[in-house]
């Protein structure tokens, strides 16, 4: 499963939301959405996965591989990463 940590007003997160929806539609991958700017529990969860490697959003975490993506990325990179490539 993939976790998408984002901030509601974050411009980078807003741009990535379209790519996440495309990923879910085209691949059927499960993506859990976690807003962190207005939700302290989600922010704490982000810190536990991030371990100070990124320090911001958007932050994507793959629970199967333990891999992550920090910041905005391309659709192809997001798709390949979600597939463990």
Image (spheres, rainbow, N blue to C red):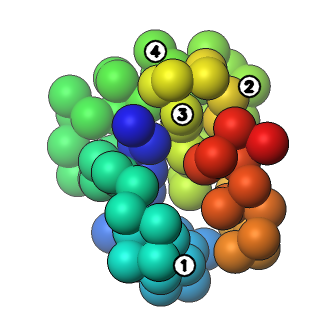
Q: Is residue 70 visible?
A: no
Query: How far apart are the two marked residues, 2 and 3, measured between alpha carbons?
Result: 15 Å
Residue 18: x %, y % from top left: 47, 84
Q: Is residue 47 above or below residue 30?
A: above
Sooner in the amino-acid sequence: mark 2 or mark 3: 2
Proximity of marks 4 and 2: CB atoms separated by less than 8 Å: no
Q: Is residue 47 above or below residue 6?
A: above
Instruction: Please rate how many residues cluster around mark 2, counting C-alpha atoms within 10 Å: few if below 14, some from 14 to 19, many from 20.
Output: few
Element type at marker 1? Answer: helix
**Mark 1 or 2: the one toward you:** 1
Give the side of residue 64 with respect to residue 78, left or right. Answer: left
| Quadrant assignment, res 53 | top right
Q: Which mark is residue 48?
A: 4
Query: How far apart are the two marked residues, 1 and 4, measured between alpha carbons?
Result: 25 Å
Element type at marker 4? Answer: helix
Instruction: Please rate how many residues cluster around mark 1, counting C-alpha atoms within 10 Å: few if below 14, some from 14 to 19, many from 20.
Output: some
Q: Which mark is residue 62?
A: 3
Give the side of residue 19 with respect to residue 69, left or right. Answer: left
Residue 82: x %, y % from top left: 60, 48
Sooner in the amino-acid sequence: mark 3 or mark 4: 4
Query: How far apart are the two marked residues, 3 and 4, measured between alpha carbons?
Result: 13 Å
Residue 9: x %, y % from top left: 39, 75
Q: Quadrant of the C terminus?
A: top right
- The residue closer to the viewer here, 31 or 51, is 31
Residue that label 2 marks: 53
Residue that label 1 marks: 19
Proximity of marks 3 and 1: CB atoms separated by less than 8 Å: no
């Amino acid at each position: 499963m993939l976790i998408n940590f984002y901030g509601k007003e974050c411009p980078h997160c807003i741009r990535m939301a379209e790519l996440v929806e495309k990923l879910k539609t085209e691949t059927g991958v499960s993506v859990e959405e976690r807003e962190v700017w207005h939700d302290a529990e989600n922010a704490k969860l982000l810190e536990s996965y991030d371990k100070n490697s990124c320090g911001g959003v958007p932050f994507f975490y793959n629970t199967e591989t333990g891999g992550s993506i920090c910041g905005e990325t391309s659709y192809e990179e997001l798709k390949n990463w979600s597939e463990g490539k």
